[in-house]
Image (cartoon, rainbow, N blue to C red):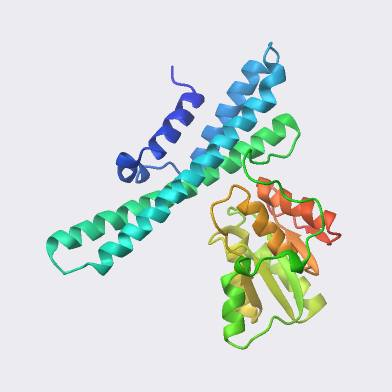
Amino acid sequence: METQNDVLVGVLAAMQNPPGIEDFAGAIPPDEALIQIVSAAYGELADALEDGPLAGSLERILKGWTDVLHRTIEGLEKQADRAELDMKEAAAAQDYSEVMSVELERKTDRLRALQNAVEAVSVMRDAGASTYEARCATLWRPMHGSRPSSKIITSAMIDARDLSRSRKILAAEGRVIEGAKIALFGDRNDSDYTKVATVLDKVKNKHGRMALLLTGQKTGADACAMSWAKANGVDVVIYKLEGHASDRYFRRNERMLSEAPKGVLVFSEKSAFTRHAVETARKMGLPVKRCGLAS
């Protein structure tokens, strides 16, 4: 009988197989199913080991699984970068023949499939990190790459290349960010616009002019905040992930928080990276408000 562990191994193997990625990516299960698969697989393993002779190794094993998911994302993102270059080269070489058009379409489909796979494994990695932390009562960190510094981050520590694209656009337009900077962290499933808007309305009433610092997710709390900001004439600064280092999610948190925002709004702590943001903000002495949007 196939276990959830078998399913997890099969999903990962298919996602890491370049020749078949296009066929597989079209059949990626929805986020809810992926979360259930990973949570159940971790649970099965933990239940089997926690009362036996391997109980002392359970934390290391579950962390290792989460590290594998994390490294899988890195590998897929590198493939996606190469696929994007291939697609651009094919587009530049177009002679409008059927052969070249088919080739461009094939390379475009491969890039799209790889991007979908990255999103799916990210969901799995976050689910794994959450289950690991619940079982082992310790915060997950990637095996490779530097751990986030426990020291206070200052703006002088930020390299110029790490500035977000949105900041550069604002500067090019001769605009500056005015008012209170408010950092917002949430989950892609925090989709209750009314609740997000209610919180942001209160913040705006308190501070008047304000600017939102966001991670730029296209769904969830970030998307709701973007819609609210547009409707209320509030500037938004988007902090994109930079590079392929395993700690890039943590570095993004630190870049956002190094702006010394007046407040940090947290709509969910399901993600290990959101929990890291909360931990970092507290170490920096920044006020954190838990908005309790998601259970």
Say if residue 291 shows up in the picture.
Answer: yes
Check the image and name the residue furthest to the top: 53
Identity of the residue drawn at 70% across and 14% down:
51
Where residue 204 sits in the image (x, y, percent)? Answer: 75, 76
- Nearest to the observer: residue 286 or residue 144: 144
Where residue 215 sits in the image (x, y, percent)? Answer: 62, 62
- Nearest to the observer: residue 32 or residue 7: 7
Residue 62, image quadrant = top right
Identity of the residue drawn at 73% across and 73% down:
201
Identity of the residue drawn at 34% across and 43% down:
21
Where residue 147 sits in the image (x, y, percent)? Answer: 70, 46
Say if residue 270 shows up in the picture.
Answer: no
Check the image and name the residue furthest to the bottom: 174
Where residue 220 sits in the image (x, y, percent)? Answer: 59, 58
Against 234, residue 275 (above or below) is above
Identity of the residue drawn at 50% across and 26% down:
4
Residue 154, image quadrant = bottom right
